[in-house]
Image: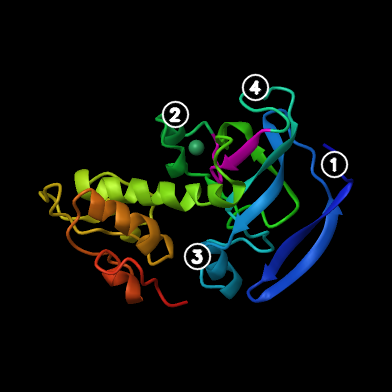
């Protein structure tokens, strides 16, 4: 695979200020891989970052956290993937040292960074990722479909938690209102409300999974997603 010396990337310098920059293709660190991006989804977080309504966004930032692509280069200590592998990415970077990380809940890391929010994302020709957040996909799965793994995985996590374990979920301050552990104590599986954020993945992923797993009631997100379980075909208004 020929790797050029420069690439283009999308940069949101400030709310509603987008530009295309030509920069050097990054070199992966020892524990990283360089990915040639094939597809990048436009997530709700990307839209909120663009509009300036996501307080956790650190500008300037490259949006994009739903990705698929091909490994173009690997760091010296990377063993789980190799050049040419078709992959998807879990778009978080965690410290590996804090209590949450050591408990295996790196999504709750106190220093967690999410692609496209606190760190550069994937709206570029190439991006580097921690190798332990990169996963090979089957040959039968098109790259254009594989980008849905990220929102679907959130849907499965949210749906599973809401239907079967109401007090499980992310414990980060500020995320509480979006996650199922806020459900009332004592709710039984199948009686839980389905509680997720008001994002496209709500009707498309979380709500559908929650309903399949027994959640009878609805998303508590704002706007139309309140009724996402009952009307999964209708998404929130942006
Ligand atoms: Zn950590």
Q: Name the residue under label 4.
A: 79
Side of 26 where 58 appears, left or right: left
Q: Distance between the residues labelled 1 and 2?
A: 36 Å
Of labels 4 and 1, the one closer to you: 1
Q: Mark 1 points at which residue?
A: 3
**In-front residue for pair 186/122:** 122
Secondary-structure class at tag 4: loop
Q: How far apart are marks 3 and 1 (CA)?
A: 31 Å
Of labels 1 and 2, the one closer to you: 1
Q: Report crowding for label 3: few under 14, some 14 to 19, many 20 or more residues within 10 A (C-alpha).
A: some
Q: Which image quarter holds the N terminus? A: top right
Q: In this view, does 127 lie above or below 72?
A: below
Q: Name the residue under label 3.
A: 44
Secondary-structure class at tag 1: loop
Which residue is rendered at x = 63% and y = 52% of the image?
119
Side of 43 where 197 appears, left or right: left
Q: Distance between the residues labelled 4 and 1?
A: 21 Å
Q: Name the residue under label 2.
A: 102
Mark before the other along the chain sequence, 1 or 2: 1
Q: Which residue lies furthest to the right in this view?
A: 5
Q: Report crowding for label 2: few under 14, some 14 to 19, many 20 or more residues within 10 A (C-alpha).
A: few
Percent position (x, y) of residue 190? 14, 50
Segment colored magenta: 85-95
Of labels 2 and 3, the one closer to you: 3
Indicate if the residue with disc 2 has its beta carbon within 8 Å of ligand 1: yes
Percent position (x, y) of residue 52? 57, 73
């Amino acid at each position: 695979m020929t790797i050029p010396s420069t690439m283009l990337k999308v940069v949101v310098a400030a709310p509603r200020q987008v530009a295309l920059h030509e920069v050097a293709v990054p070199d992966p660190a020892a524990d990283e891989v360089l990915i040639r991006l094939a597809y990048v989804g436009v997530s709700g977080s990307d839209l909120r970052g663009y509009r300036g309504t996501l307080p956790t966004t650190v500008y300037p930032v490259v949006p994009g956290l739903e990705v698929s692509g091909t490994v173009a280069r690997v760091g010296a200590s990377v063993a789980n993937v190799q050049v040419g592998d078709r992959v998807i990415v879990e778009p978080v970077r965690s410290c590996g040292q804090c209590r949450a990380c050591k408990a295996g809940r790196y999504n709750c890391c106190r220093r967690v960074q999410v692609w496209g929010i606190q760190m550069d994302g994937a709206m570029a020709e190439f991006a580097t990722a921690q190798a332990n957040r990169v996963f090979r996909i089957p040959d039968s799965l098109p790259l254009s479909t594989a980008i849905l793994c990220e929102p679907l995985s959130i849907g499965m996590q949210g749906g599973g938690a809401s239907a079967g374990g109401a007090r499980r979920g992310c414990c980060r301050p500020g995320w509480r209102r979006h996650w199922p552990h806020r459900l009332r104590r004592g709710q039984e599986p199948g009686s839980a409300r389905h509680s997720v954020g008001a994002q496209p993945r709500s009707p498309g992923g979380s709500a559908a999974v929650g309903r399949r797993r027994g959640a009878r009631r609805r998303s508590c997100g704002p706007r139309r997603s309140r009724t996402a379980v009952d009307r999964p075909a209708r998404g929130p208004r942006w």
